[in-house]
Amino acid sequence: MNQDSSGNKTKFVRVWRQLDVEEVKKQLLYIDDLYGTCGSCKKLGLNYLKDKKCPDCGSVFKYLATKLTQPAEVGKILSRIQKEGLDLTLIERADFERSSAQDAARDLFKS
């Protein structure tokens, strides 16, 4: 639990939002703890605390996705984002990959 500047106690809660999967993919950094991979060009070894954009393709990161599922581990990432004042949204990687796979399958059968 955190306290904001007005003294209110705040907590992290998951929120469901409809997103354009293709737009998210262009602004996504896949992470496992600290280091990650650009969702657009697959550049490896990026640090979400330091790399605001991909040094190879120039994608500006707005979203993070992680395979970590333990609440304590996810909480660490969320706390780092908040502590550093980063303008990043953590999305659930499994949901995102499922949505991407559905779109790919649908596109495969278009004539």
Image (cartoon, rainbow, N blue to C red):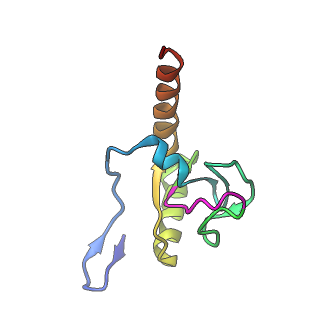
Q: Is residue 50 inside the magenta stretch?
A: no
- State the residue at coordinates (56%, 49%): 66
Depth order, front residue of 66/74: 66
Percent coordinates x, y for residue 88 in the rendering: 47, 64
Q: Is residue 88 above or below residue 31?
A: below
Depth order, front residue of 111/34: 111
Depth order, front residue of 22/28: 22
- State the residue at coordinates (25%, 85%): 6
- State the residue at coordinates (66%, 62%): 54
For the N terminus, which image quadrant?
bottom left
Left or right position of 45 against 38: right
Percent coordinates x, y for residue 103 in the rendering: 47, 28
Q: Is residue 53 above or below residue 2?
A: above
Left or right position of 107 against 59: left
> Is the magenta region chiefly helix, strand or loop?
loop
Left or right position of 3 against 80: left
Percent coordinates x, y for residue 43 in the rendering: 73, 53
Residue 59, quarter of picture:
bottom right
Q: Is residue 60 inside the magenta stretch?
A: yes
- State the residue at coordinates (63%, 58%): 33
Percent coordinates x, y for residue 97 in the rendering: 52, 36
Where does the magenta region start and end? 56-63
Q: Is residue 53 above or below residue 67?
A: below
